[in-house]
Image (spheres, helix red, strand yellow):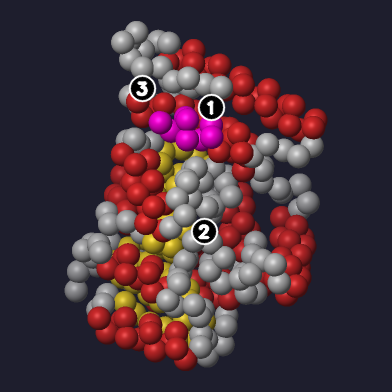
Amino acid sequence: MKKPLCTVIIVSHNNFAETTGPCLQSLNQDNAALEIIVVDNDSDQQTQEAIRATAEQMPRIRVIQKETNSGYSGGNNTGAREASSDLLILLNSDTQVPPGSIPRLVELMDEHPEWSMLGPVSNQTGNDQQIHTRGTTAQEILDEGAAWCAHSRDCHYPTDILSFFCVVIRRDVYNQLNGLDEEFGLGYYEDTDFNYRAVKTGMKLMITEDVFVYHRGSGSFSKTSAAVRKMVKRNKKLFRKKQGHGHNAAHWRLKNLVAMARYGDPTITDDPLADLQYKFNNRQTMARQLLPNSPIKRFFYLRQLKAIERNFLARISAFSPTDTQPTLP
C-alpha cells in the first residue's frame, strides 16, 4: 500500500454538525493521499453515529472510539500512535481546510527538512498566524483567506510558538518530545507547553503565509463557564511549574507588529509591491484594533507602529514611481 502524504489527526467531542462534520467535508474536497484519523473522545451517541456514517462514505477516515474523554493531549497522542506516515497534522475539529492546503503544507516540509513544525495563517489564532478578516460566515472568511493567499508567494518565517488549530509536526519530533503532556487534562496550555519544549531542544518552528485555514474557535469549550475558568487556571499553574514563571509568550499584538516589520525589510522578503501592500494593510488594520488599554502601553505601542509604517513607506519608495503606493493613516 502506498504511504500517505501525511496523517491528519482530528480529536472530536460532540457538536458534530458544527465542527467535525464540516471539517471532514472540507478535507473530502481534496483528492490528496491523506490518512485521516478521527479520535472520538466519548462523544454523545448522535455524534458517534454521524462520525461512523461519514467514515463509511470517506474510506480515508479511520475512527478510533474512546470510552472516556482523554482530552486534547490524550486524543492526539492516541492518533499519533496509530499514524502510518512521517508527517502528522494535528487539526482542530472546528476548522475548514481549503483544497490544496494540506499538499502545500506537506510540500513545504519536504522542501525544508530543517523545519520541525509548521503552521498556516488563519482568522482566529491569538498569535502572529492571525490575519484580519471581516466575514461573518465560514465561506466569507474562507474567501478572504483565498484572497490573502493569492498575495503570498513563498512567504515563511520563524516563530517561537504555533497555534495548534492546525500544525504540521514531524513524527520523529513528536515522538522525541513524548507527544503532548496528558497531565493538562481536557485542554489548555498543552500546546503551549509542547511549543516551549520544542524550542528548548533547538527545533525550528515556522509559519507560512501561503496557506490559510478557517478556524471557528471554541469548538469544545465555552470559555465563560466556571469549570473552564478553573481548568485554565489549573493548567496555567501547571505550565508555569514546568516551564518557569518567565516563560510568557509576547502578546499577539506585538507579534503582529513583528510580522508587519518584515514586510518593510528587503533582506527578508522580495514580494511584489502589490502583495506587500495588501498584506501590510491587512495587518495594519488589525494592529489599529489591538490597542492596549493602558495609556502608557498604548503610547509606546503606537510609537512602535508608526515607526514600522514609516519604514514600510521608505521601502516602497524604492519601487518604480509608476507603482501605486499605499496611503497610511
Image: magenta residue range:
278-285
Disc 1 crowd, CA 10 A, few/some/many (<14, 14-19, 20+): some
Q: Amino acid at mark 2?
A: Phe
State the separation of the CA atoms marked 1 and 3: 15 Å
Q: Earlier in the sequence, mark 2 or mark 3?
A: 2
Tag 1 and tag 3, C-beta contact below 8 Å: no
Residue at position x 34%, y 35% from top? 151
| Tag 3: amino acid | Leu
Which residue is rendered at x = 51% and y = 46% of the image?
130
Label 2: element kind? loop
Q: Which residue is mark 2?
A: 164
Circles 2 and 1: CB distance less than 8 Å? Answer: no
**From the viewer's perspective, is the residue at label 2 or at label 3 nearer?**
3
Magenta run includes residue 297:
no
Q: Is residue 328 above or below residue 176?
A: above
Q: Quadrant of residue 95?
A: bottom left
Viewer-nearest residue: 8 or 283: 283
Instruction: Based on the picture, tell me whether residue 281 belongs to the magenta stretch.
Output: yes
Looking at the rendered structure, the kind of residue marked 1 is Ala
For residue 261, the mark is 1
Q: Position of residue 51 (x, y in %)?
A: 38, 82
* Residue at 31% across, 77% down: 61
Residue 154 seen in the figure: no
Q: Is residue 54 left or right of residue 120?
A: left
Rendering coords of residue 87 (x, y %): 37, 60
Outermost residue toward the front in this view? 136
Where residue 288 sits: x, y (%)?
60, 34
Using a 10 Å C-alpha cutoff, classify the residue at mark 2 as few (fewer than 14 neighbours), some (14 to 19) or many (20 or more). some
Q: Mark 1, mark 3: which one is toward the viewer?
A: 3
Quick one: label 1 or label 3, which is nearer the N terminus?
1
Determine the residue positioned at 44% across, 20% down: 326
Q: Tag 3's secondary structure? A: helix
